[in-house]
Amino acid sequence: MCRWMAWSGQPLLIEELLFKPRHGLVDQSLHSRMGVDTTNGDGFGLGWYGSGGGPAVYHSVSPAWGDANLRDLAAHIESPLFIAHVRATTGTAIQQTNCHPFRHGRWLFVHNGVIAGFQAMRRDLTLAVDPELFQGIAGSTDSEVIFHLALTFGLDADPVRAMERAIGFIEATADRHGIDNAVQASLGLTDGERLWAFRYSTERKSRTLFISHDAAAIRRLHPENPRLQRLHDEDRVVVSEPLADLAGVWDEIPETSVLVVQPGADEQREFRPS
Amino acid sequence: MCRWMAWSGQPLLIEELLFKPRHGLVDQSLHSRMGVDTTNGDGFGLGWYGSGGGPAVYHSVSPAWGDANLRDLAAHIESPLFIAHVRATTGTAIQQTNCHPFRHGRWLFVHNGVIAGFQAMRRDLTLAVDPELFQGIAGSTDSEVIFHLALTFGLDADPVRAMERAIGFIEATADRHGIDNAVQASLGLTDGERLWAFRYSTERKSRTLFISHDAAAIRRLHPENPRLQRLHDEDRVVVSEPLADLAGVWDEIPETSVLVVQPGADEQREFRPS
Amino acid sequence: MCRWMAWSGQPLLIEELLFKPRHGLVDQSLHSRMGVDTTNGDGFGLGWYGSGGGPAVYHSVSPAWGDANLRDLAAHIESPLFIAHVRATTGTAIQQTNCHPFRHGRWLFVHNGVIAGFQAMRRDLTLAVDPELFQGIAGSTDSEVIFHLALTFGLDADPVRAMERAIGFIEATADRHGIDNAVQASLGLTDGERLWAFRYSTERKSRTLFISHDAAAIRRLHPENPRLQRLHDEDRVVVSEPLADLAGVWDEIPETSVLVVQPGADEQREFRPS
Amino acid sequence: MCRWMAWSGQPLLIEELLFKPRHGLVDQSLHSRMGVDTTNGDGFGLGWYGSGGGPAVYHSVSPAWGDANLRDLAAHIESPLFIAHVRATTGTAIQQTNCHPFRHGRWLFVHNGVIAGFQAMRRDLTLAVDPELFQGIAGSTDSEVIFHLALTFGLDADPVRAMERAIGFIEATADRHGIDNAVQASLGLTDGERLWAFRYSTERKSRTLFISHDAAAIRRLHPENPRLQRLHDEDRVVVSEPLADLAGVWDEIPETSVLVVQPGADEQREFRPS
C-alpha cells in the first residue's frame, strides 16, 4: 500500500535520492521489503518546490521503474524540498488524479496506508468536506479525502491539530459504521517550509517510517562516503523504508507520533486524533 | 463537447460504423462539423453487448484517431447493439473514469453537452445520489452525475421518467444557485434491449442528434450501395452528426424529445423534465 | 523476462484462463514464481482469432494487473485460439510496439527470454530481414527481430524449419561477435489453426514451458471441478508456469524441443537450429 | 505534420512561451493555422538545458492541450534554451520514442515535415547510419533517421555541413527509388550553445518558419507590453507559426536557408544539400 520519501535541506538533484541510492524509492516500487505489497506499480508522483510559483507536481500512471520521463526529470530538477510516492492501489482506479502527492495552494500531501471500509464511509466523509473545497476533489481515493478533511479542519492555521481532527473524524465515522481499525497511515505533509511526518494507526500497529539521523553524526560515521560527506547539518530524509546507502543512520519515527522537520531543531510529539 | 453514435440491429463489426463510413465517429473526433469543438480528442469510449455477461466497456484516454487498440477491437468485435463516444472535455480530467459510456448493471449511458456551473452545484447534485449508488461514482464529470441521478430516480422502472426527474432536479438546483441554461444535452441510454436518444436543453437550443431513416427506404434510395443494401428493417443508427455514407437518409430527432429504438415500431415523445 | 500462455480448443471467454484460475497469467504478472523476474509489469498483450478477418491484437503498456480494459475485454471476448503475454523488459522501451504478440498476416508470435548482446548484433540481424518485411518492424525488441527473421526464412512454408534457421542465424551471428549463450527462449507461434511451442536456449537451460495433459485424463483426475469437467478432448493450454487450478495436470515441454498443438494428435520433436 | 518552437536567451519559465502567448505552441496543437494539419495531437516533446548534466527531455503521447504534467512542468522549469514540438503523425506509431526532440549527447533535434516514400527507403537509409549509432535508434520515424544520418555525417564537427550531407544522401537515395520531392523539412537543432533553424524542401516549397525580430526593435514597437519590454537583446524565438502576442515582429526564415542563433550576431546562409 504505497511507499514514500521526502527530502528537506540543501538543493539536490532529485535523482540523488530517487534513483542513485541502493534501495531508493524507485527500487522500492519493484522490491519493497517492509511494505504490505512487494510491488508498488500503480502510479507514481513527485512534488517539489523550486522555480515558478507554488509547488510543482508530476503524476504518472506508469510504474516508477519504467517511466522514462521520471528518470529525466529527476536528473534535471533540483529542489530543497521534495516528496515522492509510489502507489499500490487498494482498489480505486489507476489514474493521475489518484496519484500522490495531492496539492492545495502551497500544500503537498502523501499517504501510505488505507481507510478501512472507505467505500461504505465515502459519502459521509466527503460530505464533511467544506463545500468550497469539495470541488477540488478530482480523484476517488481515501487519501485525497483525508487531505480535504484536514484542509477543512484548519490545516493552514494548525497543521497537526487539523490532521488530528481529520483522523479523529474518520475514526468516529467508522465507529458509527461499525468498522474496526479504521485508519492505517503514514502521512507526509509540507507547506514548502516545514515537513510533517505522521505515523499513526487506529490499532497502533502503523506502517514503518524513518528519518535520517543528525547529518553531522552521519558524516562522522561514514568518512569514506563522498555523497554522505556532502550532507549539511539541516538535511533530512524521511522514508517508508531505509535507503541501503544510509544503512545504520536511520531513526524510526515512533508509533503514534508526528515529527516536524524545520529550520533549527526538529520537533516530535504524540499524535492524538480527536 | 463530444460526439456519439449508437447502433441497434443485426450483429455488425463495430468498424463498419466507427471507421468505414466517410465522416464516421473517428473522423468526427478530428473534424467535427456540427459540434461546439472541432476536435474531440480527450478520450474515447465504446460499450457493447455480446459474448459474456452484461455490457462490455472499452475506455481510452488516447484520441480515437490514433488508438491502435481501438482499430483492432472495432475490426474484430461484432455486436447487435453498441454505443461509442468521443470526448472534448469541458474542464475535468482526461482519465478513463471520465470516459463514456458509463455503465451500471445492464445500462450504458453517454452524454454530449454540459451542465452549466457544474462545479458550483457538484456537491448538491452528488448528495442527491442514492447513498448505495454514491460509491459507484468513479470519475469527476457532470455526465456521470446525471447518470447516477437517473439511476437514483428509478431508471430501472421507468427510464424516461427517471431521466426527466434527473434533468428536472438539476434545473431546480441550478435555479437555487442562480445558474441560467443549466442543461445542454444529447443523451444516449440503453439496457441492451432498447435504446433511448434524448435531445434536450434548458434553453431549447440543443445539440444536434439524428436517426437513420427506415431501412427499407434507405435500400430503395441507394440501390448502388452494397453496404446499405445489407441493412435489415430493424437496423437503426443514432448519431450526433450524419455519416457521409448515409447522406440524405437522416431524420433529425426533434428538439425537446426522446426517441425509443426498440423491436417493432420506434416511439417518440416530448421530454418533460420536472 | 516475461510469461505467456496460449489456449487452443473450444471457444472460451478469455477471462476463464487469464483471470479466473489461481495463479493465472495476470497473477503471474505480479507474482511470478518460476521466472527470472518476480514482476512482469512492463506491458501486456493479447492476440486472438474470432470475428473479423485475421487475428486481433490488444497491446497495453499498463501492467496487466491494473488494466481495466483488459479485464473487460477478457470477460467479453470468446475465442477458440488465443495467446497472451506479460512483459518484463530487458532494456528496450515500454511501448505498445514492443508488446507481444507480434502479428504478420495470419501469424501471431510471442517470446519469453532474451538474445544476449542484442544491441551489438541488432544491425546485423536486422539487415538479414527480407527488405520487403523490414518496414514491418515497428518496435525495438529482440523478439520482433526473431519473428521477422523467421518470416524471412520461410515461416509460411515450414514454420519449424524457419524458426530453426532464424535461431541458427542468430547463434552464428553471436559467434562472430564473440557472444556466448546467445539465445534464451520459449516461443509461441500460431497461424490460427495450429500452435507451436518452442523451448530452446543455446546453453540448454531454457525457460520453463508446460502443456496441459490430455483432457480426458484431466477430467478423470478432477471429477469435483466443474470447470475442468467442461474440457473437450482437443483443448490444450500452454503456459510458462502452471496455473494452480490445474495442479498436477501439466507436462513439461522438454528442453530443446518443439511441440505442435493441432487437430488430432499433437506432435513433438527435437528443435535443431542451423 | 507538426509544429515546433525554440527559445534562446535569458532563463525563462517555459510556460511563458508555451502557454501564455495567444496562439502559443499548445494552442497550435489544437488550432494550427499554417500547418498541413489543423490538429497536432499525436504526441508532444520538450527538451531543455538547465540543472543536471546535458539536455533534459520530456515526451508525452497525450495531446499537449490536455497534458496536466506538461502544464506543471512548464510552470516550474526555467531554462535559457529550450525547444518544444507537437506532433501530427504521418503514419508511424504514437509512442514516446517517436516524439521529438530526439537527443544524442548534448544535441537536441526536431523536425516538421516528412520524407516522402520513407517506408520504401527506410532500410537503405538506416543502413547508412554509423553502426555505433545504429543502436541508438529507438523509434520508427523518418525524423529520427535524419538525425542519425546527420550524426553519422559529422554533426559534432560541422553541423550545417553534416545536415547538408544527410539531406543530400536522402535525396540521392530517393532518386534511386524513383521518389520525387523526397524531403520536406523545417528542422531545429541545438547543442545547448547555439540553435540552428533549417528551412528546406526538395521542391523549394518548405514549411513556414519564423524568427523573432531583434529584441531592441520589439521593445520599441510595443512599449505597452510588459512581457515584451523584458526581452533582452540576445533573446530569440523560432516558431513554425507566429505567436499572436508578437504579431508584427516576426521575420520569415527564407526558403532553402539555415539560420544560426548564437551569442553575438546571428548568421544566415543558403542550405545546399549534397
Image (cartoon, coloured by chain):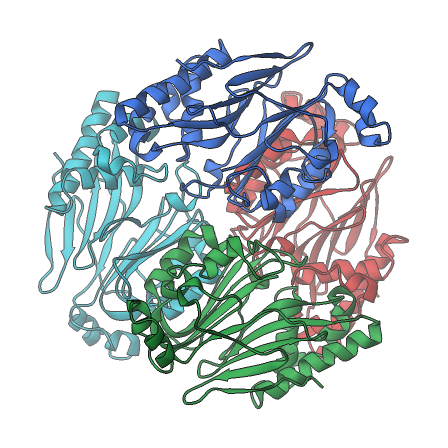
Chain colours: A blue, B cyan, C green, D red
Extreme-right residue of the structure: D157
Q: Residue D141 versus residue A182: which sits nearer the camera? A: A182
Residue B272 position within the rendered picture, expressed as x and y whole percent measured from the top left: 11, 39
Res D151 → quadrant = bottom right
Classify A119 as above or below C11: above
Is residue C118 something one can see in this rendering? yes
Q: Is residue C170 left or right of residue D260?
A: left
Quadrant placement of the C terminus of chain A:
top left
Residue D147 position within the rendered picture, expressed as x and y whole percent measured from the top left: 76, 58
Classify B189 as above or below A130: below
| Residue at image location 58% in from the left, 55% down from the top | D95
Q: Residue B214 versus residue B65: which sits nearer the camera? A: B65
| Residue at image location 42% in from the left, 15% down from the top | A273
Q: Residue A203 versus residue B97: which sits nearer the camera? A: A203
Residue A47 position within the rendered picture, expressed as x and y whole percent measured from the top left: 59, 30
Classify D143 as above or below A156: below
